[in-house]
Image: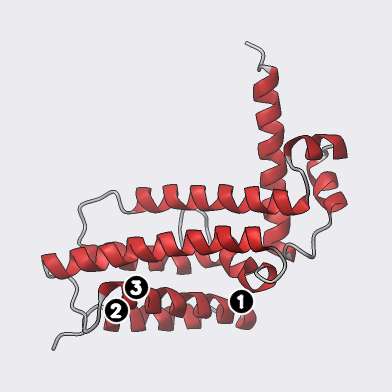
């Protein structure tokens, strides 16, 4: 059965997003021109503007697509009967290395790549990233609360505050890891996370 026009259009849109993701991840949003995106996926300019009103609109959809995929990966990672602490640590362990993708999530994270670059340039893109990170911190906070209830986590502060600090620490570690081309900051963040989740009085 031949694909419908709607399916062809959707496939082309996904091709532009996938190609654009790889370019933006390597060069940043500002560093990638529209012509380079079009050339990389062999799509005419008219097709691009059929799906996206502007480069900024493309950036917004790219981030929404990335965050949606990220949420699905996270739900899959946590769909087991492990303790809450084990789930949190398995997530951040994936930041360091995920065997399925042969690298760490930190290396392919658009938030790590774009947060500082884009936040002052596009309010719409900033809001999408802000919403995505708040969702993630809330999920971590819920797991911390679950861990406290089941006895796998011990903290000396409120769960939302601990979750926020842990995420901030990992975001900074990911930036330093990129700067140094070394995973040591991520491994140090893992040690600190374990300490923060085991603060027995």
Q: Is residue 16 above or below residue 115?
A: above
Residue drawn at x 67%, y 13% is 2
Left/right of residue 131 with respect to residue 162 in the rendered view: right
Q: Is residue 87 above or below residue 6?
A: below
Quadrant where the C terminus is found in the figure: bottom left
Left/right of residue 140 with respect to residue 199 in the rendered view: right
Mark with earlier residue (1, 3): 3
Q: CA distance from mark 1 to mark 3?
A: 23 Å
**Residue at mark 3:** 163
Left/right of residue 98 with respect to residue 58 in the rendered view: left
Residue that lies at the very extreme toward the front in this rendered image: 123
Q: Residues within 10 Å of mark 1 (few under 14, many from 20)?
A: some
Q: Position of residue 112 (x, y in %)?
A: 58, 69
**Residue at mark 1:** 178
Q: Secondary structure at mark 2?
A: helix
Residue drawn at x 29%, y 79% is 194
Left/right of residue 143 with respect to residue 105 in the rendered view: left
Mark 1 or 3, closer to the camera: 3
Residue drawn at x 19%, y 73% is 153
Q: Residues within 10 Å of mark 2 (few under 14, many from 20)?
A: some
Residue drawn at x 36%, y 48% is 76
**Residue at mark 2:** 194
């Amino acid at each position: 059965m031949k694909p419908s026009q709607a399916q062809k259009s959707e496939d082309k849109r996904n091709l532009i997003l996938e190609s654009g993701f790889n370019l933006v991840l390597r060069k940043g949003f500002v560093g990638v021109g529209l012509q380079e995106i079009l050339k990389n996926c062999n799509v005419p300019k008219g097709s691009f503007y059929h799906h996206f009103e502007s480069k900024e609109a493309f950036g917004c959809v790219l981030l929404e697509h990335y965050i949606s995929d990220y949420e699905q990966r996270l739900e899959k990672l946590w769909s087991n009967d492990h303790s809450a602490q084990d789930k949190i640590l398995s997530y951040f362990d994936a930041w360091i290395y995920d065997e399925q993708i042969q690298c760490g999530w930190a290396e392919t994270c658009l938030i790590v790549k774009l947060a500082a670059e884009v936040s002052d340039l596009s309010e719409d893109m900033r809001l999408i990233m802000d919403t995505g990170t708040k969702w993630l911190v809330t999920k971590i906070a819920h797991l911390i609360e679950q861990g406290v209830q089941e006895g796998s986590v011990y903290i000396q502060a409120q769960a939302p505050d601990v979750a926020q600090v842990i995420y901030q620490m990992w975001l900074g570690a990911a930036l330093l890891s990129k700067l140094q081309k070394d995973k040591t900051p991520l491994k140090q963040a893992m040690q600190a996370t374990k300490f923060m989740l085991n603060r027995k009085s």
